[in-house]
Structures are given as structure tokens and as C-alpha cells.
Image: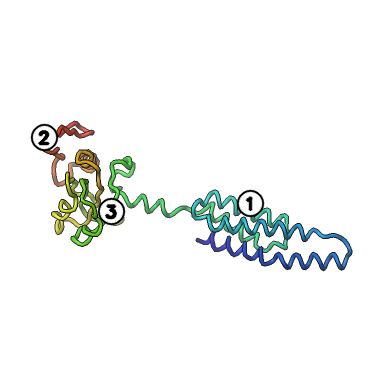
Amino acid sequence: MPELVLGVIGGVLGLLFIPVMVFLGGFMEAYTGNPTTLYAQAGVSALISIIGLVAAVLVKSNPRAWGICLVICGIVGVIVASGYYVGGLMLLVAGILALVRSDPKEGKDAMSFLTEERPRTPRKTLLAYGSYPLDESTVDARVTKVSPGAYAVGAEKGKHFSVQLVGRSDTDIRPALKQYIGEYDRFKFEYFDTPEAAFVRECLLYHRFNEPAGRLAEGHPVRSAGTSWQCPKCNAH
């Protein structure tokens, strides 16, 4: 991050210049016989430099809050220590960059879900893991728990995952996914604590990606025999 680099350089330069300010202060007092403000300016520079270094290291965790801190450090350093504080400008620039930059993580998160047709659908109707290539080694590497689960299989179109079939397993999601190897290209999945929870998620996925075109390969999910589960969208079972 440029904010981190500029902030660290600015803080270090400020600390390195403090002995120069102290030396100049002593020289001016000895030459003029009058007190100088350079000692106070050196103290302010030291404090601002330390705070700036801390803010630069932490700016990635909260760009807005620590960016404001960097801007304040830069402004105070430049005003109070005047031209003697050579790192103030770098702290100021680092803070401004932190405030105006956009967080790339948001874009990655938005693309990691099933966002092909309904990007405004609530997150609870999506799947937590994927998409991944649908082959045996990837399924074994990614699906590591024996657990009920729901899944979606399909293909990748550009930057989005095209859902072509949704399903679930009431016992172990891994073999349920492997039956589609060679038929579909990619998959997403999520574990659930109970078979009923997996059924509910399968229903929500079905309604999201089947309406209104009816484009999924199979019909409405069917509950397991002997259960009274109902679809939260249409009460079907």
C-alpha cells in the first residue's frame, strides 16, 4: 500500500531530522544568546513522527480512521515544526491516499457469490464456498467435512458463476458433487448442521435461479421421506 510506504518514510525522516533540529537550536542559542523554539519544535516532530508511524502501520485495517490520523499528523507537523519537519508532507499525502482509495476487497467479495442474475438478493440465499473447478481432486481438497450441505453446479461466464443446477445432500455433500463431474464445469457449496437446513437453502437457491425463466435442469427440491419440511418460498415439499 502506498499509504504504508509514504507514512513509514515520512515518520522515519521526521525522527532522523530531530538531531539536526536540536543541533541547530543549540548553535542558534550560542550564536545569538537568545532562546530558540527549535527544541519545542523537535519535541513536536518526535511525537508526530511516532504517531505517524503507528498510523501508517495500522492504516490497512481501517483506512478512514488512520488516514485521518495521518492527515492530522502531517498538517500539525508542517505548521508547528515549519520547514524543519521534512516528513510532514509525506504523512499528509499518505493520509489523503488512505481517505480517497477504494477498498479492493469489496469488489472481490461481491464477485465471490452467486451474482449472475440477482445481485441484490440477500446474502443468506447464497453459498459460502466457491466457485471451484468441478473435478475429483478439487472436490476432495475443498469439501473436507462429512456433512449435510447444499450446492450449485454450472459454468463460469466471464467473471460470474452461471448456475445450471442446485441440489443438496442430507448426509455427505462430497459424493453428491462428484456425480456431476464431467457434466458441469464449476461448483459452489455450503455445509449445514441439519438436513432440513440444507433442504431450505436448496429451495431458496432453486427459486432464486429458476424464476422466472425456469432454466434450472431439474424441478423443485423434494424433501426426504418421512419428514415434514416445507419450502419457505412456496410451501412445497
Residues at marks 3 and 2, CA–CA distance in whole angstroms? 32 Å
Quarter of the rendering containing residue 140: bottom left
Q: Earlier in the sequence, mark 1 or mark 3?
A: 1
Q: Are marks 2 and 1 in contact (CB under 8 Å)?
A: no
Side (left or right) of 127 relative to 53: left
Determine which of the numbered discs, if any, sits on residue 72 in the image.
Answer: 1
The location of residue 230, given as percent across then percent down, is: 18, 33
Camera-side residue: 156 or 196?
Answer: 196
Give the secondary structure at mark 3.
strand
Q: Earlier in the sequence, mark 2 or mark 1?
A: 1
Question: Which amino acid, mark 3?
Answer: Gly
Category of crowding for the residue at label 1, using alpha-carbon neighbours closer than 10 angstroms: few (below 14), some (14–19), many (at least 20): some
Residues at marks 2 and 1, CA–CA distance in whole angstroms? 66 Å
Q: Relative to residue 151, is residue 225 depicted above or below?
A: above
- Residue 212 in view: no
Determine which of the numbered discs, if any, sits on residue 130 in the image.
Answer: 3
Q: Are marks 1 and 3 in contact (CB under 8 Å)?
A: no
The location of residue 64, given as percent across then percent down, is: 53, 49
Question: Which amino acid, mark 2?
Answer: Gly
The location of residue 118, given as percent across then percent down, is: 29, 43
Q: What residue sits 71% from the left and 55% below the top?
A: 79
Residue at the spot of label 2: 226
Give the secondary structure at mark 1.
helix
Side (left or right) of 35 relative to 169: right
Question: Which amino acid, mark 1?
Answer: Ile
Number of the front mark, 3 or 2: 2
- Residue 50 in view: yes
Q: Earlier in the sequence, mark 3 or mark 2?
A: 3
Residue placed furthest toward the left: 225
Residues at marks 1 and 3, CA–CA distance in whole angstroms? 42 Å
Give the secondary structure at mark 2.
loop
Category of crowding for the residue at label 2, using alpha-carbon neighbours closer than 10 angstroms: few (below 14), some (14–19), many (at least 20): few
